[in-house]
Image (cartoon, rainbow, N blue to C red):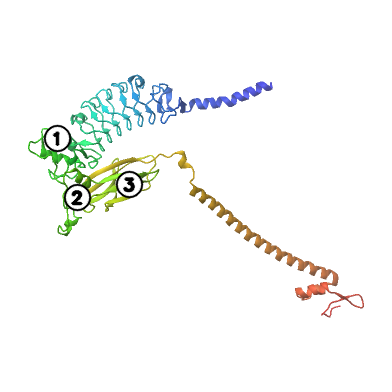
Amino acid sequence: MQGASTTSTLLLLIFPSLLFFSHFPSTVNGDCWLIEGDKGYVWLAICSQNQPPYETIPQHINNTVHDLRLNENKLKAVLFSSMYRFTNLTDLNLTKNEISYIEDGAFAGQANLQVLQLGYNKLTNLTEGMMRGLGRMQCLFLQHNLIEVIASNAFWECPSLSSIDLSSNKLARIDPSTFTVLSRLMVCELAANPFHCGCDLYSFLTWLESFNNVTHTYDRLQCETPREMFGFPLLSPIAAGHAGRNAKNILYHHCRDGVMIPGMTSLPPDLDGPSGIGPEMFGGVGPYHQPTTSSSSTELVVPSIKLHHVSLSSASLLVQIPRPYSKMYILTQYNNTFVSDVMNLKNKKEMITLNKLKPHNNYTFCVGSIRNSQRYNHTCLQFSTRAQNQDDMLPTPSTTTHYIMTIVGCLFGMLIVLGFVYYCLRKKRMHDEKKKSICVKKTILEMRYGPELGNAPLSQHQLLQTFLNPTSGKDGHCLFRGHGYE
């Protein structure tokens, strides 16, 4: 009977727990966190930063998943055989892997996919087959890859695409027909690409100028080559007619039908001129050298920015400027669509310390100049702050010393307070004992010699002398020295 009672008690305790976990929406399946809905549907599968990292797309995930996150693993390829099961996908995150190959038609089974994130991988080109079947895709992220070539028909099967990020790749040339089929396109990020500003780029710049980019990141689109066009913005936000100093207007005067006009020089108009800051303010007094196209002068003319040191929350940049007062040079920070001026640059060479940075975050800083109400970026630097590791959580020697001194100070303060309390209590106790002793002696005198003596107005000293040195009278009564009482 006792064994049966124990068994029934255990069943009553275990059954509610099993019932609770069977209906709990968040479960773990094969190193992936799953958020499930009704009837076995999986809304979200988080397989990020798996240990050990996934090298292929895991097949144990329920094929009903809607949002699949496989970022920060070591996937090297995306194949149709590993993707065809996930027909309900609407969001797919493959950021920060090692993907260098996407099979043509790999996403053909994801007709409902709306957001595809492929940033921070090793892709080198985009073909028409890679995006096949993604008719409902709205956002495509391809930033920080190694893409050099985009096929002109790469996005023909993506009519719903409204946002694409191709920043920080290796794009030097882009066919303008690549984006003309995207009638819903609103955001096209192309910053930090090494554009070759030759005549063959002019048609793309014409499309880019007519495209109403929501982010308006004009300043981050610059020429990398040829040398004489280095640092020129592709477009300027305030360019009026052909007076704006940008690559499009320069190529407009030098190119026809994608080739250089015969007899025209390939050098752009000189950008240096009165800026309202330098020696020209003083009537042209002092040397003011115009830049030439030689290699030696190019090194002197182009500003530079280098990363000197980076930590969790700070970084040091070494900035060099050829002629600080020829233009108004500024250090600018870019954060997606947010642009802010950090400081004015007034020295030829200075070390700039940036504090309050976020750990494991990407930052872009550019050295630019302002002239005639227009901003020009000369060079930019991208870097990432360090990720926080276990060693950073350990206290430093200075921190340990600070903690020890704080504890010692608190203990010393407590000791002083306790000593003061002890002194006050001891003083009060001595006073009470003294008062009590006098009362006892007075009571003894009253009991021994009568109430008249006890009520006599004697001082404390007299009472003590009377009590300690009594004399006897003839009739046996005590006579007290110095008093006439019997």
Task: Judge by depth and name the residue closer to the eye, 452 or 295.
Answer: 295
Residue 216 location, quadrant:
top left
The mark nearer the N terminus, 1 or 2, is 1
Mark 3, secondary structure of its residue: strand
Number of numbered labels in the structure image: 3
Front tag of 1 and 3: 3
Q: Counting other residues with Cα less than 10 Å from the Cα at mark 3, is it few (<14), some (14-19), or many (20 or more)?
A: some
The mark nearer the N terminus, 1 or 3, is 1
Numbered mark located on residue 199 in the image? 1
Q: Position of residue 5 (x, y in %)?
A: 66, 23
Q: Identify which amino acid the numbered label 3 is placed on.
A: Leu
Q: Identify which amino acid the numbered label 1 is placed on.
A: Cys
Q: Position of residue 381 (x, y in %)?
A: 29, 42
Residue 455 visible in rendering: no
Identify residue for label 3.
317
Q: Is residue 104 left or right of residue 310?
A: left
Q: Position of residue 430 (x, y in %)?
A: 71, 64
Picture layout, residue 263 above or below residue 473: above
Front tag of 2 and 3: 3
Mark 1, secondary structure of its residue: helix
